[in-house]
Amino acid sequence: MEFLRTLPQLRPRTNTFSAVFRMRHRLAMEVHSFFDGRGFSYVHPPILTSSDCEGGGEIFQVTTLPLDSIPMNDGEVDYTRDFFRKKAYLTVSAQLEAEPLALALGGVYTFGPTFRAEPSDTRVHAAEFWMIEPEAAFMDLDDDIRLIEDFVKHIASGVREKCGPEIDFLAKFVEPELPKRYTTLLDAAFARITYTEAADIIGKQGAGRIPPLEWGDKPAAEQERFLAEEVFSRPVFVTDYPASFKPFYMRMNDDGRTVACTDLLIPGVGELVGGSQREERPDVLARRAAELGLDPSTYGWYFDTRRWGTAPHAGFGLGFERMLMYLTGIKNIRDVLPFPRTFGSMV
């Protein structure tokens, strides 16, 4: 596998990769089938953006300024001389653009490339990958969770039904337990716990095996997989995380400490989906953005969606490649991308 990553132009000719890429096609078709059947509109957000939706700062900047003689003004880069007359980035999420469309159309979804300049050389991180991001008006967190579970089950069922030969091949040569993965997704309801309950479970059942999860800390991948693989042995929704490490757009709960959000954790992968009810109250949204030090001028257009009429709404993001990894048994994200772009590597 590792050697074949150096030959992305040739590896689709192998049996393993041709099976994976046929399943990639089928999975994409099942995505469209689900949302079209639910009456969602497929919308096309921009790849170039002026904002960092996640607020993490791990973004690729785009510029036409000459790198050998960057124009300066009072010691700072003069972006008024750049193509867009301001800073521009590759998108990290289509959510902010999907929200105003959902408030107009009712339910929308995006499905396209996403970029993260995260210097992580792991089996689950890529600099360029695909995300599915639905958004719907008049939907709360409970509705969001039901939509996520229905969606995941639908696409897994469609792949199992239409990719039998590929699944059999990959079960024989890549992951013997692959058929059981489909059973895990399809034959039982997903579990659901709060972040606070997760911290308690990890502290008690993981004592001496994994580090405890202190309330207010972001869960580590090891802790997430412990919950999905050892505690529940099936997908589990974890809800109501502390607001301190979540984005500004998530709706603040009445306790003033947590937000109405969820992560779906699945065995063998960890976090697959992140979703939330969005903050529809203009004053709370502005306060949260200020607390996180975001520049109001950058997000003015987004705040307008609250100022000029809004409604409760929610959505989520699912990593297409991580879903494909689970459904194929492939253990490295580089091997489900036709031409992977990862930290320190771009063929």
Image (cartoon, helix red, strand yellow):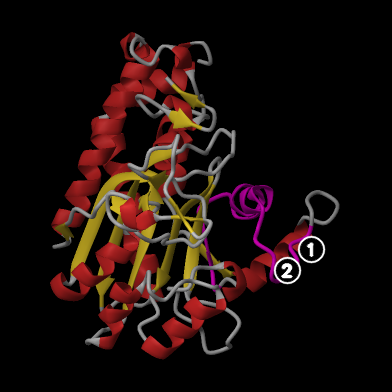
Horizontal side of residue 285 vs 232, given as left or right: left
- Residue at disc 2, secondary structure: helix
Residue 134 percent location from the top left of the image: 28, 60
* Amino acid type, residue under disc 1 in the picture: Lys
**Residue 149 seen:** no
Which quarter shows the C terminus? top left
- Residue at disc 1, secondary structure: helix
Horizontal side of residue 115 vs 267, given as left or right: left
Count residues near mark 1 (Cα–Cα under 10 Å), then give few for <14, some for 14-19, many for 20+. few
* Amino acid type, residue under disc 2 in the picture: Asp
**Residue 326 seen:** yes
Count every numbered label the image shows and give the total: 2
The magenta region covers 212-240
Q: Taking 231 as reference, is 183 above or below it?
A: above
> Could you tell me which residue is drawn at 45 percent across and 87 percent down?
284
Q: Are marks 2 and 1 in contact (CB under 8 Å)?
A: yes
Instruction: From the viewer's side, name the closer residue of 176 and 198.
Output: 198
> Could you tell me which residue is drawn at 47 percent across and 59 percent down?
190
Q: Taking 27 as reference, is 72 above or below it?
A: below
Residue 202 percent location from the top left of the image: 73, 60
Horizontal side of residue 100 vs 74, given as left or right: left
Residue 233 percent location from the top left of the image: 58, 49
Q: Which mark is residue 175?
A: none
Kindly give the residue lying farthest to the right in the view shown. 208
Residue at which label 1 appears: 204
Residue 16 percent location from the top left of the image: 39, 16
Is 65 in the magenta?
Answer: no
Tell me how far mark 2 sits from mark 1, CA to CA: 6 Å
Instruction: From the viewer's side, name the closer residue of 345 and 252.
Output: 345
Residue at which label 2 appears: 200
> Could you tell me which residue is drawn at 46 percent across and 13 percent down?
6
Q: Taking 54 as reference, is 28 above or below it?
A: above
